[in-house]
């Protein structure tokens, strides 16, 4: 995991991913079927290794799960 600052919004998105509410498609993160209000959060969390980048339902990586567990 990159040494990056995780914002409260990032944590909320990670919780939504963990709850199965997100889909990652064409570089866009959809939450409950709607584009995330922060268009950069999905690609940033993928780049930081916290969510998986494959199209379809978004999944936390091991690092993403560890970060949420530590919060």
Image (spheres, rainbow, N blue to C red):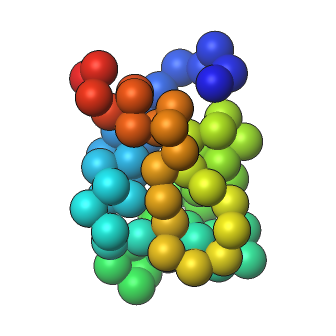
Please state the horizontal and vertical placement of residue 22, each as a whole percent of the image.
Answer: 42, 70
Q: Residue furthest front?
A: 62
Q: Please identify the quadrant where the C terminus is shown.
A: top left
Dividing the picture into quadrants, the one containing residue 69 is top left
Residue found 29% across the figure and 49% down from its top: 15
Q: Residue furthest bottom?
A: 33
Q: Please identify the quadrant where the N terminus is shown.
A: top right
Please state the horizontal and vertical placement of residue 11, each as a whole percent of the image.
Answer: 35, 38
36 versus 55 height, above or below: above
39 versus 15 height, above or below: below
25 versus 29 height, above or below: below
Residue found 32% across the figure and 71% down from its top: 21
Please state the horizontal and vertical placement of residue 8, each as a whole percent of the image.
Answer: 33, 33
Dividing the picture into quadrants, the one containing residue 33 is bottom left
Q: Is residue 18 visible?
A: yes
Residue found 49% across the figure and 75% down from its top: 57
Which residue is at the front of the view, 40 or 62?
A: 62
Please state the horizontal and vertical placement of residue 50, each as a whole percent of the image.
Answer: 55, 41
Q: Is residue 40 visible?
A: no
Which residue is at the front of the view, 19 or 37?
A: 19
Dividing the picture into quadrants, the one containing residue 18 is bottom left
């Amino acid at each position: 995991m990159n040494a990056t600052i995780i914002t409260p919004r990032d944590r909320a998105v990670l919780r939504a991913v963990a709850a199965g509410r997100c889909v990652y498609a064409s570089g866009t993160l959809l939450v409950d079927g709607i584009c995330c209000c922060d268009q950069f959060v999905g690609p940033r969390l993928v780049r930081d290794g916290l969510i998986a980048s494959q199209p379809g339902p978004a999944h936390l990586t091991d690092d993403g799960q560890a970060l949420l567990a530590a919060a």
